[in-house]
Image: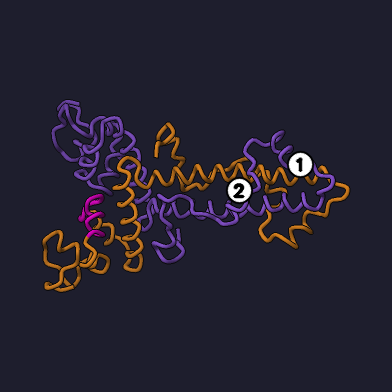
Chain colours: A orange, B purple
Amino acid sequence: MGGNSPCASCKLLRRRCTKDCTFAPYFPSDDPQKFAIVHKVFGASNVSKMLQELPVHQRADAVSSLVYEANARVRDPVYGCVGAISYLQNQVSELQMQLAVAQAEVLCIQMQHEPTVMPIQQIMDSDHKSYFLHNELHQFLNFGSSSNVIHDIENIFGHDMVS
Amino acid sequence: MGGNSPCASCKLLRRRCTKDCTFAPYFPSDDPQKFAIVHKVFGASNVSKMLQELPVHQRADAVSSLVYEANARVRDPVYGCVGAISYLQNQVSELQMQLAVAQAEVLCIQMQHEPTVMPIQQIMDSDHKSYFLHNELHQFLNFGSSSNVIHDIENIFGHDMVS
């Protein structure tokens, strides 16, 4: 950036903004709040270290996710981003249950009208692109976990979360 | 805790662990990694400030969520927790679409067999506690947003996320 127009980070930290400033590309001087919030939650030194450990082409995304996380923590100081994950995990479970019920409903009605019903595959091919095949219903009735990278929040907190 | 058995935080920071140590109740000396990871991502000073701003009964949950977030950031230095939110938001959208399709399927089959079919409400009342009413199908076909507290990740990054 150059000494005369420091980036938002160098301005807040009251230091000289050099040409190779790690923050300057992501924290322009006209948006001081963006840096202030990541500084408050993660600390400038940690953010700098995290960015320097990443290749340049991934740093903009890392900054966006850090800003998102920091905002979530300020809005919800107890649960932060984890509140959103818990909410979404519950929503996924609820939808999986509703989907299993609706698919069971389809099977149930079809069985009631078996002799006259149009073959299900025929209905699907003509009307519905993403219809689930019957054998996939079993998968939903088992309510498998969302993803192996996402830990079950309820297990971590040992109780229902308030947020 | 007392000077002779410092908590994991005071041990790492090489300072005396006093009776009123903010960290001691949540970072026992036998689990040094738990503090090391939040220190690496958020910094001891920020964690201490965050805990002190909360009432005591909420601090254990805040520590759990900070540890969860820090672990997510170490596993995925670019997206951290936000990667999980993006994954879950996509899963919710996909399930909402599949549910709308399955519910449309129910209506479609019922219309084919209208003269002889058992009224849907009767089937629902007898078999399915959480079946969606017909007018709620419209809501799903509109694919409403998950929650007003969760920002749309794709809008923040402006592209599909890799994680």
In this picture, residue A7 sits left or right of residue A94: left
Which residue does the image show at 80% across and 53% down from the upper left?
A: B112
A134 or B43, which lies in front?
A: A134
User: Is disc 2 in the same subunit as disc 1?
Assistant: yes
Q: Chain of mark 1?
A: B
B36 or A82, which lies in front?
A: A82
| Residue A50 on image: x %, y % | 28, 57
On residue B119, which mark appears?
1
Q: Amino acid at mark 1?
A: Pro
Q: Is residue A35 magenta?
A: yes
Q: Is residue B1 magenta?
A: no
Which residue does the image show at 14% across and 63% down from the upper left?
A: A11
Q: Badge 2: few (under 14), some or many (20 or more) residues near its Cα, within 10 Å?
A: few
| Residue B77 on image: x %, y % | 35, 56
On residue A152, which mark appears?
none
Assign the C terminus of chain A to one quadrant of the image. Answer: top left
Quarter assignment of residue B65: top left
Q: Badge 1: few (under 14), some or many (20 or more) residues near its Cα, within 10 Å?
A: few
Name the secondary structure under disc 2. Answer: helix
Q: Chain of mark 2?
A: B
| Residue B156 on image: x %, y % | 39, 61
Which residue does the image show at 88% across and 47% down from the upper left?
A: A115
Which residue does the image show at 71% across and 43% down from the upper left?
A: A104
Quarter assignment of residue B32: top left
- The magenta-colored residue range is A33-45
Q: Amino acid at mark 2?
A: Glu
Report which residue position mark 2 lands on. Answer: B136
